[in-house]
Amino acid sequence: MRAGRRTPAADGLGAVDLLAARAMRSGRRFGLVIGCLAGGEQRVAGYGRLRAGTQTTPDGGTIFEIGSITKVVTGLLLADLAEQGIVGLDEPLAGYLPAWVRVPTRGGRQITLGDLASHAGGLPRDPKGTLRRWLGDRRNPYAALSVQELYAGLARTRLRRRPGERGRYSNLGAGLLGEALARAAGRPYQELVRERICLPLGMPDTVITPTSEQTARLATGHTRRGRPAPPLQLPALAGAGALRSTATDLLQLLRANLNPAATPLAAQLERTQLPRLRMAGRAEVGLGWLIARPPGAAGPVLWHNGGTGGFRGFAAVARQTGTAVVVLSNTARSVDRLGLRLLKALSSGAG
């Protein structure tokens, strides 16, 4: 290759700084970290500030709350435990909860573990009584919700539709799935994720409770108005959104989804990507992954976003073009549009 010639992948990666600068221009964000994979190349870059009162820029080792991107990990954990025969995708949720817990049914159909991972359980978005909790702390509405209260609320919950028929996004369902998997394996959710997902894929900084060393690398979250936000607490809904991670770790997860055969979790990763049913609109859903088919795209895009009181995140994979992107922000302003523009630029360069 002649000196000075740019590859298509380099052209796509070169668009990252331009798009990031536009996103930061309004001054409404504290910081961003963007991670990209294209043409076999990887790039991680940080912009803005780690927290107020400092000029330190976040980087690939900065730890962010990733919110609902956690659901992708929970879906992969389900696929792994199913692959090992510890649980079954089509087995009822009720079989993995205490005997006294009443799990609602509709039309004679029980909620299965696979239903929960694909938002097909017919459950509402949030646990019973959550709206009242918002009055206490809008930025941390689940902090006081215990597992016992979660189970009690489930008994009072009426299913919106027959399980397995159609997807309806549910934090409650993903949280229940995390609890069920932990009970089935006899280990806390965080330990299961570390042992079965993070260690095999090389993701050491994906945790719920950080170590003292990791705590020093935590970004400070900020509300839309730029005020510091309290750390997220999800004691009863860990599987729905409790994980913290870095752009470097999430790129490892995305790389594994680009080429499952090169990982120890090949069958599990492939299973999470298979469409199980359709959500509202044209979107489909696998085990954790949301699946879009943008007009003009070379193939389906696996994606998920996430948000907490002080953070926003976006992760996406396009296997046909070998591209992936993760965007993490320590401000509660959506990064979905930025993530989609980045993926389009990378895919165009790769094509």
Image (spheres, rainbow, N blue to C red):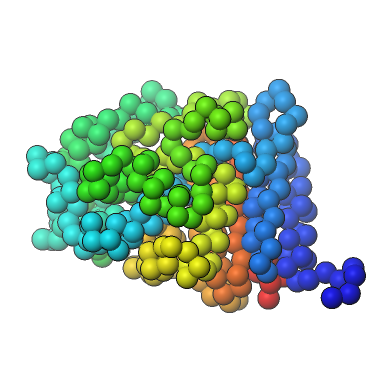
x then y, percent, for residue 268: 38, 64
Q: Is residue 351 left or right of 87 when viewed as pictured?
A: right
Q: Residue farthest to the right? A: 3
* Above or below: residue 104 compared with residue 320: above
Q: Closest to the observer: 161 or 180?
A: 180
Residue 308 x/y as whole percent:
49, 38
Q: Which quarter of the rendering shows the N terminus?
A: bottom right
- Residue for point 73% across, 64% down: 12
Q: Is residue 332 left or right of residue 108?
A: right
Q: Residue at x 75, y 71 (%)?
A: 8
Seen at 83% across and 69% down, the residue is 6
Quadrant in the rendering for residue 339: bottom right
Between 238 and 150, the residue placed more toward the observer is 238
Q: How many marks?
A: 0
Residue 59 image-quadrant placement: top right
Position of the C terminus by quadrant: bottom right
Relative height, residue 346 to residue 143 (above, below): below
* Residue 244 relative to residue 188: left or right: right
Q: Residue 261 at x, y = what percent?
A: 47, 70
**x then y, percent, for residue 113:** 25, 56
Mark yes or no: residue 93 visible. Answer: yes
Q: Can you see residue 273? A: no
Residue 135 sits above or below residue 121 on the image: above
Q: At 72% across and 26% down in the image, what residue appears?
A: 54
